[in-house]
Image (spheres, grey):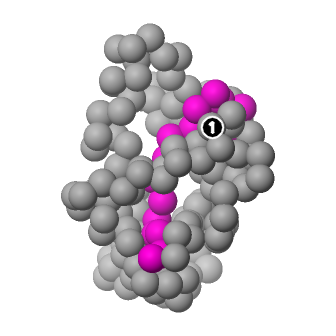
Amino acid sequence: MTVRQMGIRERAVSLGAILIDHGAPGLNEEERLEMMRRELTSDLFISSTNAVTSEGTLVNVDAYGNRVAAMMFGPRKVIIVAGFNKIVQNEKAAFDRLEQIAGPMNMKRLNRETPCTHDAVCHDCRTVSRGCRAYTILRRKPSYTPMDVLIVGEIMGM
Ligand code: SF4
């Protein structure tokens, strides 16, 4: 959502980049999955993060695992962009943020049939629609992945 809000995709295309985007409109399920696989070997992967601690740790939750996988290995370079609202004190506060803000807000945005969609509270649900599945903690950048983390002085994303 942060990357979309910033218009990075449109700017990249205008500069001649080949965009690999599983969120592009008009893709069927098979095409979307194929895009996710191609993103894993892209030259540049741009994403936000669900939380970044004051120590510099990135904490994320993902439904399919494609986003967190691409953050860790595969793309030749990774850029993480996050609004300052993603900054939390420590890893515990990061997981609190995932549970209390990012998870419920994402489920509501995607209109998933999960309890948090209705009351904005995490129930650690066991629904088939649960989006909180793959949790990752990056305390240092992965060894073979050049990574920059850019903090934007605005409230962005979820
Ligand atoms: S675990 Fe379930 S209830 Fe909790 S935020 Fe994720 S989808 Fe919602």
Q: Quadrant of residue 35?
A: top right
User: Mark 1: which amino acid?
Assistant: Lys
Residue 138 visible here: yes
| Residue projecting furthest to the left | 154
Q: Quadrant of residue 135?
A: bottom right
Q: Is residue 98 magenta?
A: no
Estimate the x, y position of residue 146 in percent, counting from the top left: 65, 44
Q: Magenta part of the protein: which range?
A: 40-54
Q: Residue at x 53, y 88 (%)?
A: 92
Nearer to us in this view, 11 or 55: 55
Q: Is residue 66 left or right of residue 84?
A: right
Estimate the x, y position of residue 107 in percent, counting from the top left: 42, 65
Q: Is residue 136 above or below residue 88?
A: above
Q: Is residue 27 above or below residue 150?
A: above
What's the magenta bit mostly, secondary-structure-wise? loop
Q: Residue at x 74, y 40 (%)?
A: 74
Crowdedness near tag 1: few (<14), some (14–19) or many (≥20) residues, C-alpha within 10 Å: some
Check disc 1 and report the residue beneath it: 77
Nearer to us in this view, 88 or 114: 88
Nearer to us in this view, 48 or 99: 48
